Amino acid sequence: MSEPTPLRRVEDHSEELRAADGRVPGLRGRATRQRLLACTLEMLTSTSYRDVKVIDIAREAGTSPATFYQYFPDVEAATLVLAEEMAQQGQHLRLIITEGSWLEGEAMATALELVDAFLVFWDSHRSVLRVVDLATDEGDGRFQKIRVRLLNDITTALAEVVRQAQKAGRIPKTIDPMAAAGVLVAMLAHTAAHQYGFEFWGIRTAKLRQSMARQVSWGVTGIIPPD
Amino acid sequence: MSEPTPLRRVEDHSEELRAADGRVPGLRGRATRQRLLACTLEMLTSTSYRDVKVIDIAREAGTSPATFYQYFPDVEAATLVLAEEMAQQGQHLRLIITEGSWLEGEAMATALELVDAFLVFWDSHRSVLRVVDLATDEGDGRFQKIRVRLLNDITTALAEVVRQAQKAGRIPKTIDPMAAAGVLVAMLAHTAAHQYGFEFWGIRTAKLRQSMARQVSWGVTGIIPPD
DNA sequence: GCCAGAATCTGACGGTGTGTCAGACATTGT
DNA sequence: ACAATGTCTGACACACCGTCAGATTCTGGC
C-alpha cells in the first residue's frame, strides 16, 4: 500500500486527470470541473446542440470562459465525458437480459422489463444520447466507441439468448445471432429515442411497449408470445 | 389562362418563393439559391453539423455571406429545404409495401425489398437525415413535421398489412397496428442509419438484411418466415 | 499567524463568424 | 439609351473563440 518505487518518479496515470497546462488538478479544480460538466449538461438539455456556447456554460457556472478551457479543449470534449458517465450507468441494462428468464411463458415479461428499462434510460439521458448519435453518424470515433461500448454488452447478451434458441431448434441456424440481436437493439434504441414522437402521433405508450416487447421476445426466443 | 382579376392585385402565393426583402426571385436568383442549397448539402456531408458556417457555404458557392442571407435566415432554414426535398423522394418506399404481396411464401421477399430500399435511401441521404433526427429530438417542430411526413406514410401502409393479419387471426387483436408498424419502422430507420456501424462491428450486411426482413415479415403478417 | 510557492482563475486581446445595411452592379423592357 | 427592377456585396457592429500573462486564492512549513 505504501509507495513502492521511491527512486523512479511514478507517473501514476491509470485514470489521471490533466488540466490544459498539464497539471493534476486538486480539490478545488476538480470541483470547478464538475460544475462545468453539470452546466454543460444543462445547456445541452435546454439549447440546440449547435448553439451551446462555451461562454454560456462558463457564465452559468459562475466562472470565465478561460477556466473552461483549462479543463476541456472544447464543448465536444466535455460532452464526451458526460457520454462516458452515461455509458457507465447503462451497464445495468445488460443484467436484465442475463439474469432474466427467457423460457416459454416468461420471455414476454423479461422483454417488457427490458423495454421499460430502455425507455427510462433513454429518457433520462436524452440530451447526451442525441449528441452521441449525431457525432457517431458524423464519423467521430470517440463517440462511436462509447456508443458501441454501451450497446455491445446488451447486444452480445441478447445474441447469447438467440444462440440458445438456435440450439433448441426454435430459430433457424442460418441466422447470425449478433445480427438478430443488433437489429432488436436498434429498434429499442430508436423507439426509446423517439418515444414522445409516437405519443404525439396518437399511439399510447402501453401499446408501444407491448409491440416492442413482442418483437424482442419472438426475435430472441422464436416463441410466439401469448396475447 | 389570362389574368382573371385585373383590379385586385392577386398575390398568387401557393408555392411562392420569397427572398429576405420580400421580393419574388427571378431566374438568376433562383439559380443562386439552388447553388447555395447544393453547397449547404456538400458542407453538411463533409463537415460536422456544428461547424457548418454560412461563410464557408458562401465561399464554396462563389458568392458572399450576405447573399446567403438573402435567401435563407440561417443554415438551419437551408437544411430544412433540403430535408423537404428528401422527404419527397422517400415516398416511393410506401409503394413497396402497398404494391408488394404479404401472402405466405412471398412476404419475406417483399420485406427484403423494403429493407434494401431503406438501406439505399438512408445511405444516400445520410447527412440530411442525421440533422433531421437531431433537430427532431431537440423539439424542432418543423423538422419533426418532415420526419413524420416521411415515416407516416410508410407506417400507415405497414399498419394496414398488420390489420389484415389481425382479420386473418394471425396477429392478436390486442395489438395496436400503428404501434406494431411504428416499432418496425423505427428498427428499419435506426439500422439503416447505423448500417456501417454494424459492419465495423463484424456483422455482414447480408446477415443484417436477413434479420431485419425476418422481423418485419413476422411482425407484420404473423407468419413465421422460412429459413 | 505568516509567508513562499503552488494551484486556480481571469482580463484582455487578435482572430473569425454572424447578420444587416446602403448602395454598387446586372438585366430587362421599351 | 435609360429607367425600373432584380441581384449582389463591402463594410460594419456585434458575439464567440481560444490563448496568454499575470492577478488571486489556497496550502503547508515554520
Image (cartoon, coloured by chain):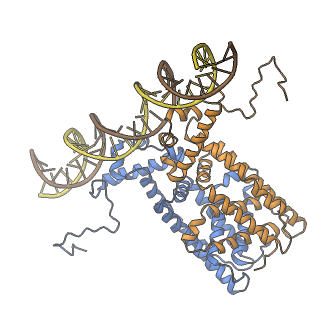
Chain colours: A orange, B blue, C yellow, D brown
Q: Residue placed at 62% from the left, 53% from the top?
A: A129
Q: Is residue B30 left or right of residue B133?
A: left
Residue A198, percent from left and from top: 58, 69
Snapshot quadrant of residue B102? bottom right
Q: Residue at x 48, y 50 (%)?
A: B41
Q: Nearer the viewer, residue B186 or A52?
A: A52
Relative to residue B138, is residue C15 depicted above or below?
A: above
Is residue A15 visible to us here?
A: yes
Quadrant for the C terminus of chain A in the image:
bottom right
Locate residue A76: give its quadrant.
Answer: top right
Quadrant of the image for the N terminus of chain A? top right
Of residues A32 and B163, the one drawn nearer to the viewer in this rendering? A32
Residue at 80% x, 66% y: name it: A220
Residue A200, position as x, y percentages in the image: 54, 70
In the displayed orientation, state which residue is furthest to the right: A168
Q: Is residue A158 visible?
A: no
Instruction: Look at 67% across and 72% down and name the residue there.
Output: B110
In the image, residue A49 sits, relative to residue C25, either above or below, namely: below
In the foreground, B118 or A16: A16
Q: Position of residue B93 (x, y in %)?
A: 58, 68
| Residue A15 image offset from top left, x and y in percent | 73, 35
